[in-house]
Amino acid sequence: MARKIVGIKQSARKLWITSEMIDTMDERRKWKAVHTEEGRKQYKSINCQLYQATDKTCEVRWKEQCDEIEQRDKQGE
């Protein structure tokens, strides 16, 4: 029953990672290779934005799953 609701891990990628986040990760990777002051600043900025976005979407996903489990619990499933 729990596997049906929560699911089984299908891939190594987290389910809350969006295509926009993947694009941002690629951009961050480019700036990591630039060994200048500007490169470090850009990398740090993009990295911070990426962490905020992933934390936010991860939290939303977990909340949705918890709400679904609570709803099913109330229905007696």
Image (cartoon, rainbow, N blue to C red):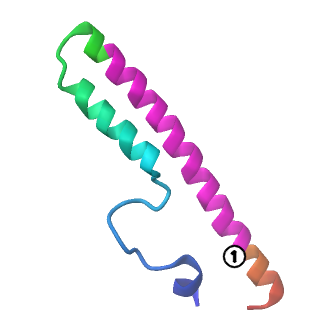
Q: Residue drawn at (45%, 44%), measured in percent from left and top?
A: 20
Q: Residue furthest top?
A: 37
Instruction: Kindly identify which residue carries mark 1.
Output: 69
- In the image, taking residue 26 as reference, residue 46 lies left or right, namely right
* Residue 27, placed above or below residue 59: above
Helix, strand or loop at label 1? It is helix
* Residue 67, placed above or below residue 75: above
Residue range of the region highlighted in magenta in the rendering: 41-69
* Nearer to us in this view, 33 or 68: 33
- In the image, taking residue 1 as reference, residue 67 lies left or right, namely right
Q: Residue drawn at (52%, 85%), measured in percent from left and top?
A: 3
- In the image, taking residue 69 as reference, residue 13 lies left or right, namely left
Q: Position of residue 22 (x, y in %)?
A: 37, 46
Amino acid at dot 1: Ile
Q: Quadrant of residue 71?
A: bottom right
Q: Position of residue 8 (x, y in %)?
A: 44, 79
Q: Position of residue 42 (x, y in %)?
A: 35, 18
Locate the N terminus and report the quarter of the image it occupies.
Answer: bottom right
Locate the C terminus and report the quarter of the image it occupies.
Answer: bottom right
State whether the magenta stretch is mostly helix, strand or loop: helix
> Is 43 contained in the magenta span?
yes
Residue count near mark 1 (Cα–Cα under 10 Å), binned few <14, some 14–19, many ≥20:
some
> Is 68 contained in the magenta span?
yes
* Residue 13, placed above or below residue 51: below
